[in-house]
Image (tube, rainbow, N blue to C red):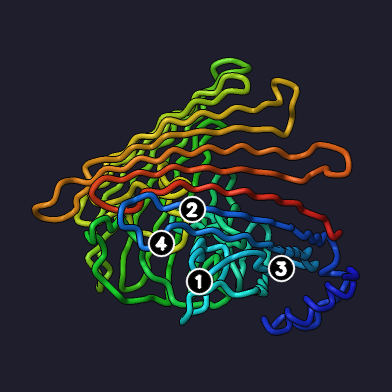
Amino acid sequence: MHRNTFTAGLLLAGGAFGLPGLSLADFAKDSKASLELRNFYMNRDFRQRGATQAKAEEWAQGFLLRYESGFSEGRIGVGVDALGLLGVKLDSGAQRSGTQLLKQDRETRRAQDEYAELGLTAKLKASRTLLKLGTLQPRLPSVAYNDGRLLPQTFRGGHLSSQEIDGLTLDAGRLTQVNQRSSSDYEDMTVSNGSAGGIGVKSSKTSDAFNFAGLTYQWSSQLATAYHYGELEDLYRQHILNLTHSLALSPQQSLRTELRAARANDAGSSNVDNDAYGAMLTYRFAAHSLGVAYQRMAGDTGYAYIAGSDPFLFNYVQFGDFANRDERSWQLRYDYDFAAMGIPGLTFMTRYITGDGIELGAGKANGKEWERNTDIAYVFQSGALKNLGVKWRNATVRTRHFGNDLDDNRLILSYTLPVW
């Protein structure tokens, strides 16, 4: 699409936000656009006895068009962002749907041939403070959008971010609806938390308001602390503390320490009651990284977060979050960058997580689970395929006394083409 035509269309959309009268040059300045092509194949085999579905297997093509305008001149700069999403079915079946790659028909549960979304965001900037209104993809401890399938999750609302004081970042906002990663419909939000064996949140209510606020202070290049608050109205309130420290041991060695603690309780119409604690140490030596994490749940329910989003947990991995009621879990992770062997663009990651002590209800044995993940990714560095990314993701999940046993494989090809 011609640059001026595309920008002019966004100017017209900006009028819907009450931003008329801005010149084309104001928006075009410093603007950028890109098109990401994402080809996603997923195969999940269910291994537990009595599984109602043998496997979920689908293949789809995604198109993600992103546009970011510049800002108009003046004390308050004005701009508009746009996000266009399209998912197209390449292969599915009545007995193989449910990977969340594709939107399903509400009645037949069959995967639809395609689904799409257009999101527009107005933005106002003054000094080092930015306000966004419209389609949002927040990445905060209190709420983080999920991008683990063909198309990403999006929200509607407002987000104010300010860095007027050196080292201090302030965030505040309100979300009103969510569009899940395999949907094209905005809807009210619900709460997700550890519910193994049916022991979890006992509320069927939805909410059209998630209020959040937080501050992060960078004390030095090595130390940062943060506090964040989130409230899904009528369902839960949550306080989150975070500390991150990096220690350089030598030019090729470092030790990263991160601590997290969260407290969530009922906001009127649920039984949410959770304390969550976690710590992770990561030792890096040249191209090698070795990490160890511990995560602990306490209270009457598991960890509370907006259903479909990414929870702020060390042991939230490819399949599980290891955040059930009373669960204790450990993670051991290893990463390697093959650039050290003369193969830039090739990376490897493997991790093993085990959890136990899961409360499943009166008279029942405690639940246990483990998960093993492996990622191998390569981004072509030159030639006709430059910037083409290929990733294979594998997960093996086994549980005791609850949940699904499964083997999960995903092959993802991605290529981002700058439009300008």
Q: Is residue 282 above or below residue 367?
A: above
Q: Earlier in the sequence, mark 4 or mark 1?
A: 4
Instruction: Point out the frontmost of discs 1 and 3.
Output: 1
Q: Label 2 is placed on what type of residue?
A: Arg
Residue farthest to the top, as pictured: 250
Mark nearer the N terminus (1 vs 3): 3
> Residue 81 got which mark?
3
Asked whether, in this view, residue 286 is left or right of residue 187, the answer is right
Crowd rating for badge 1 (residues with CA inside 10 Å; few <14, some 14–19, many 20+): many
Along the polypeptide, which appears first: circle 4 or circle 2? 2
Q: Measuring 79% from the left and 44% from the top, which residue is drawn there? A: 387
Q: Earlier in the sequence, mark 2 or mark 1?
A: 2
Q: Please report the residue visible at 86 percent of the width from the left and 59 percent of the height from the top.
A: 420
Mark 3 surroundings: few (<14), some (14-19) or many (≥20) residues within 10 A: many
Q: Nearer the viewer, residue 309 or 366?
A: 366
Query: How far, Cα to Cα, is label 1 from label 3?
Result: 18 Å
Structural distance between the alpha carbons of marks 4 and 2: 10 Å
- The residue that label 4 is drawn on is 53
Disc marking residue 178: 1
Among the two numbered marks 3 and 4 on one chain, the one whose residue lies closer to the N terminus: 4
Instruction: Kindly state the secondary structure of the residue where label 4 is placed.
Output: loop
> Is 96 located above or below residue 382 in the figure?
below
Label 1 secondary element:
strand
- Give the label on residue 44, or none: 2
Disc 4 versus disc 2: nearer the observer: 4
Instruction: Specify whether residue 138 is in view.
Output: yes
Tell me which label, 2 or 3, sits earlier in the chain.
Answer: 2
Q: In front here: 62 or 155? A: 62
Q: Residue at x 22, y 65 (%)?
A: 271
